[in-house]
Image: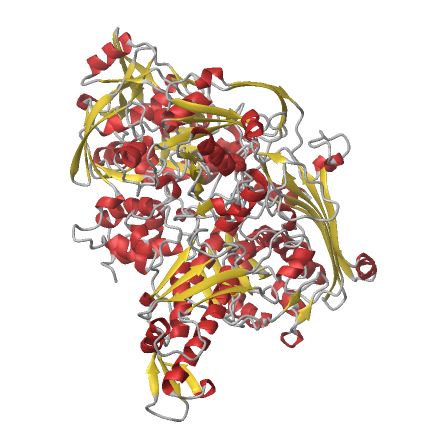
Amino acid sequence: MAGVMGSSIRRREDPALVTGRGKYTDDLTAPGLTHAAIVRSPHAHARVRGIDTAAAAAAPGVVAVLTAADVAEMGIGGVVPVGWLLPGMKTPAHPILASETVRYVGDAVAVVVAESRYQAQDAAELVAVDYEPLPASTDAAGTAADGAPQIHSEAPGNVAFEWQLGDAEKTEAAFAAAAHTVELELRNNRMLPFAVEPRACLAEYDARQGLTLHMTSQNPHLHRLLMTLASLNLPEHKIRVVAPEVGGGFGSKIHHYPDEAITALCAMKVGRPVKWTSTRTEASLTDAHGRDHVTVAELAVDGDGRVTGLRARTHAAMGAYLSTFAPAVPTYLHGTLLSGQYDIPAIWVGVVGTFTNTAPVDAVRGAGRPEATFVVERLMDLGAAAAGLDPAEFRRRNFVPADAFPYQTQVALAYDSGNYEPALDKALEKAGYQELRAEQARRRAEGGKLLGIGLSSYIEACGIAPSAVVGSLGAQAGLWESATVRVHPTGTATVYTGSSAHGQGHETTFAQIVADRLGCDVEAVDVVHGDTREVPFGMGTYGSRSAAVGGSAIVKSLEKILAKATQIAAHLLEASADDVEFADGEFRVRGTPGRSEPWGSVVLQAYLAHNLPEGMEPGLEATSFYDPANFTYPFGTHVAVVEVDPETGEVELTRYVAVDDCGNQINPMIVEGQVHGGIAYGVGQALWEDATYDASGQLVAATLMDYALPRAHKLPSFELDHTVTPCPHNPLGVKGIGEAGTIAAPPAVVNAVCDAVGVRHIDMPLTPERVWRAMRSKEGS
Amino acid sequence: MFPASCDYHRAASVDEAIRLLGEHPEAKLLAGGHSLIPMMKLRLAQPAALVDIGRVSELKGITAGDGKVRIGALTTHAELASSDVLCKHCPIVGEAAARIGDPQVRNKGTIGGNIAHADPASDLPAVLVAVGATIHLKGGGGERQVAARQFFTGLLTTAMAAGELLVAVELPALPAGTGTAYLKVEHPASGYAVCGSAAVVTMNGGKVASASLAFNGVTETPHLASAVGEALAGGDGSDDAIAKAVGEQLSIAEPMGDLHASGEYRVHLAATYGRRALCLARDRAQL
Amino acid sequence: MKEAISVEVNGRRYEREVEPRTLLVHFLREQLGLTGTNVGCETSLCGACTVWMDGLAVKACTQLAVQADGASITTIEGLAGEDGSLHPLQQAFWDEHGLQCGYCTPGMVMAAAPLIEAKPDASEAEIRQALKGNLCRCTGYHNIVRAVKRAAAGGS
């Protein structure tokens, strides 16, 4: 249908959601439903000497109490696996219920099943676990130092892996020859993913049907696969995973956690449906966290203000166990991004993945790319200062030129397309950069709130692919996507996509793709996702991959459908298929006005099968698996404007300008929504969020009383614009936009605050106290 | 998220509440529930019984007379924030109440529950200390009054005796020429006060007749900076005089700290915002 | 020990027995099957459970069901017209893309409605202050604020 692509049509998901009729996992029930409460370790590190479940088992309403002994007795796998293997990596087993040792606060040791969730909680408190506390190790870098408590016997020095990329010698030479070098030690603060809907799972089991799990999942097929292979060992065709409405994920609902396996185990054991819903404190303690890097980063700059080298050494905390995709995050999603938007001739990065007595760390919105962008964009500000250049000019001078694409970086990636200057120009113009600098100078002279302006020119790599390449790098899965398009006899269509939305609006945008190609109304297309019984194998929604990979799989199926329909139409029109074209909802013989067959009659004929080309099968549907040729590379420049109270260090984000390039836009309204949310997520990391553990291994901010999230009254409205540089290697020309704001915002905000107060660096989150101390130490120096 | 089991008793009057508290010494009073229920959800509080006073109508309402304002214990923060009577006689209470939590919390949370819970980061305690409020308590032995300045005895502890009920808060109607201000540095997570500064300044003929300054969130009980107020009295109340008084006379021992703000920083905030609050109160006194 | 309560929810009266410890939000979700009201935290700080109790927006996780005895409750399910027509705020959230995953949306709508009723000309800053008790992790609040403004202005 003309104009449907690129149109901001309202989401079909919304009428149910705004009226409270959307069904999330915890909204579901089943006849005979029971409730699970998981007993978790209060210690960061302890030996389990014994578990006494007698009092809990005797409590009112209790149906069963299970421990690791039951896992062993049932003969199931009982471990959650890691899905990305690096050379030499240590992969200690992560049991779904701990039997000998607990390694983080929140590690599961037992589960109570009861008639009500209140009773389950009552009984959970009666499970008596005899712990022998052990010393804990919580710091990403410190855990690898001599004398740190050892977490796994198979991982001496608490090192999970050591990884490097780039040319060390060439980089060393660049630093030796540099006119200016800057060095920065920084922390990328640990974050809670914090989907507002906590993780949940409803498990039903019978021997004939097998296991049905409704759960909060970003990738139901992946969850099913991992349960088959590792945690439950049930045959894959005997597990059905359904993701109903999912209340946000941000990475946290990609991973396979012990909890869904435990809930399934309970359902199999007690023979009744079992529901487990995380409390918020449990979510804080057990959802895979994000970031937690300690990095020493350096930049080499020549006398003309050109970057000649970049070097980074990072310790990345993995937590107590390796979560599903954890090893990929600080390596292939971080080290490979360290060229940013810049033409840097020499780069070297080394990463040590370390075990800590904390919740596992894995992909959280951005996943590695925010960490990389933070390193690059902080260094670019320091490099500009060293070279005596304005930060905008310094960036411009170092951009990969528009005529240099495709561009091979020094850290493995080949950027397919890009045009960085127009986005920078647009951002500067929209922000009124020169006026802001003048206002800043005026305030510095006259006093009052300090004004700061921060830039962030980010690059992202979305739609991780192709499968053969990621396989060679350690992925234990392919990273393609599947789609079936089924055209019904009356001409409407249903799409079955392996991409599993949780707020992204796929039911709307995927229908737009189909309506555009088939020339039908958007309302004539339904989109089905999130159910392993309905949809062919799929990889799910994360890493801003759904439009580029999931959308392209749909296009591939549509191409097959149109090819077959064209053959049918040619047959009906008694023309050669080569002479038949499809436009405006009808098949026409080229150059012969009046000879046409409408879409509807061709489709109907496909199913009537009264008059098909000889040998053609009836029906009109196609399934495709799309494996991209490369990542996609969205980019943009963001500008943050802050005011800082010179007496107290309190920061107010007064303006935020974002110019993004995600290629072609299917639905600009949804694109902008993704940018808005991404910015808030990144601003949260920069200003407020801090999932710090104390030395004993307690998560300091485990509830919203202490963990500070972005709230409406602390953010401005955002000022957005975009440029369009289509992706050259997928049929939609799209790149991905789900993480852009989260990647760009932290350095934009930190650069702005450092600019306001005139210091080199302040660690995130920029609490008023940290800013105040930075100002004080500057005065003192 | 799942409170422990408890019994439930509903009181229709203050006397019935006192009787029920006497009969169930293990019981906790339930008013708006916005201090107690959050503790029960985390099972940090597991009262064996609740005495619900939420429907006791004699505990509701704000009245003025005899140079005083009486606020019934069940008055919600939203009612405080929108009260014309308070705005006229003691506006700082409404100003502070409007900064408590969020609209939903203010619709249910009550002044009595807030004060009795004595959270050091709550907004009202320092205000009541600064204005010199009186807390009215009633128990089996009858009614008694405790000055706000003596009421808060420690972290989450007050001068209330077992079996007593907080029935009202009484404020002095502030004299003409008085300005007040409550400035708050909000905790980024909880929304409670990292430092709440309550200032009251009465001007007379261009001189400071009296001044008081108190803080929430900095110490375990509201901190009354008496020496600052004394230093200001009789002076001109200029910016310089206020800065000098705060700079020289503010002394806060044993400040609290957390992930977001250390004790040292909270003391710095108190000095900065104490000064700002006094200046604002003085400006308002001269309107 | 259970307590008998009588509560009017979305115009319908329910007589039920509850344990005194039962939170209002659990009563609504589990005993009445009104699952539009969500739970996002356990410290009364996310606002996903916001309902109206006797006309005031309250957090249903911070009320016991026994406290609602005799009260009139409105949940998100009771907001649309009987003919299914959306409340102006529901319509505006849809029109302005004020939601993504939708989990916080019922609470957001129930928290915002009293503001636009009381103050149709509320400024952006006032709208943001009125929503400070409600968390959204998807939208950055940008389009939520626009939706509230639009609904306040009569939908245009």
Quadrant of the image containing the N terminus of chain A: bottom left
Q: Which quarter of the picture shows residue C20?
A: top left
Q: Residue at x 47, y 62 (%)?
A: A483
Name above or below for residue B207 compared with residue A410. above
The answer to whether residue A469 is seen in the rendering is yes
Q: Which quarter of the picture shows residue A307?
A: bottom right
Give how far across and how far down residue C124 sits, in percent.
34, 53
Name above or below for residue A559 compared with residue A714. below
Give how far across and how far down residue A513 sits, in percent.
42, 68
Name above or below for residue C107 compared with residue B79. below
In the displayed structure image, the side of residue B22 where residue A669 appears, left or right? right
In the displayed structure image, the side of residue A471 where residue B95 appears, left or right? left
Name above or below for residue C46 compared with residue A121. below
Q: Nearer the viewer, residue A126 or A282?
A: A126
Give how far across and how far down residue B77 sits, in percent.
29, 33
Q: Nearer the viewer, residue A366 or A587?
A: A587
Q: Which quarter of the picture shows residue A42?
A: top right
The answer to whether residue B91 is seen in the rendering is no
Q: Nearer the viewer, residue A347 or B15?
A: A347
Residue at the far top: name it.
B141
Counting the numbered discs, the total is 0
Q: Residue at x 30, y 30 (%)?
A: C63
Q: Nearer the viewer, residue A237 or A608?
A: A608
Quadrant of the image containing the C terminus of chain A: top right
Coloring applied to the structure: secondary structure
Give how far across and how far down residue A730 sits, in percent.
54, 70
